[in-house]
Image: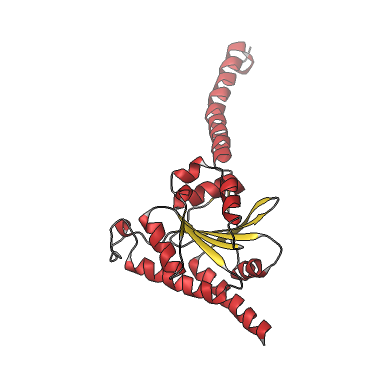
Amino acid sequence: MSPAAHPGTFRITKRRALLLALPLLILITAGSVIAGVTSTHRLPHLPPQHLAQLLSDDNGAAVIVLLRHAERCDRSDHQCLNDQHGITVRGQQQAVALGRAWRMAMPHAYQTFSSDTLRTRQSAQGFTGTASVNVLPQLGSHACKQASPEQLLKEVAERGASAKVLFTHSECLSHIAQQLADARFSPDYLTGIVLSVHSSGVRVEGTITAQEMVIAARGQYAANQKNRN
């Protein structure tokens, strides 16, 4: 009998095949697990003109812009505004510039909200100018994760004006993106999510930066001027 035909040889060959295949099976299984964990997608990007359109639409929906606060002082080398727990001078200047552009363009009244931390309140106050800021502790880093995002946003949407700007934290924005869109989102300063709240629910429109909000505001302002002429 040839060595190839010996039963023992067959068993050894089979065992070797299984041993060789085992690492591959482990890699495939691990890859499937990793794919399952990271299967969430990134939020879509919202072009500035689409935000301008959302703001001008009169369809009964409330537009909510959720923004991360401006540059925080304790994680920057830039000059603090007045407290190390707040924002920097540069962050405050950026929030003020964004607020001026927004106020110039808004076709309707709007409201500004913030969590109860100093950095979000300073960001919101810089943005809104002399207008009052509504403080919502539910927008805090930890409190946000304890509440239903959809319920919180619906409650905010019911407060008067059809447009709202909410200053919150990166953890809260990431949580809302995960809960409402099964998506990953790690926002930079003054970057956020645009949502529209309808009677049927909350829709995530996409992400936007401060610079793009200014572009959207300018576009809306130009459209308002054209309609007046």
Which of 220 and 109 lies nearest the eye of the viewer?
109
Give the number of marks: 0
Q: Which residue extends farthest bottom?
A: 229
Residue sitting at 45 percent across and 67 percent down?
Answer: 127
Q: Return the x and y of residue 71 as percentages of the image width and height.
A: 37, 62
Snapshot quadrant of residue 22: top right
Residue sitting at 37 percent across and 66 percent down?
Answer: 91
Q: Tell me the quarter of the image containing the N terminus.
A: top right
Confirm whether residue 40 shows in the render.
no
Give the left or right position of residue 101, taking residue 79 as reference.
right
Confirm whether residue 101 shows in the render.
yes
Residue sitting at 65 percent across and 66 percent down?
Answer: 54
Q: Return the x and y of residue 118 as percentages of the image width and height.
A: 36, 56
Q: Tell me the quarter of the image containing the C terminus.
A: bottom right
Which of 79 and 86 lies nearest the eye of the viewer?
86
> Residue 181, relative to residue 92: is it above or below?
above
Q: Return the x and y of residue 18 as percentages of the image width and height.
A: 57, 23
> Residue 102, relative to residue 227: is it above or below?
above
Q: How is the image coloured?
A: secondary structure
Residue sitting at 56 percent across and 54 percent down?
Answer: 156
Q: Return the x and y of residue 186 as percentages of the image width and height.
A: 48, 53
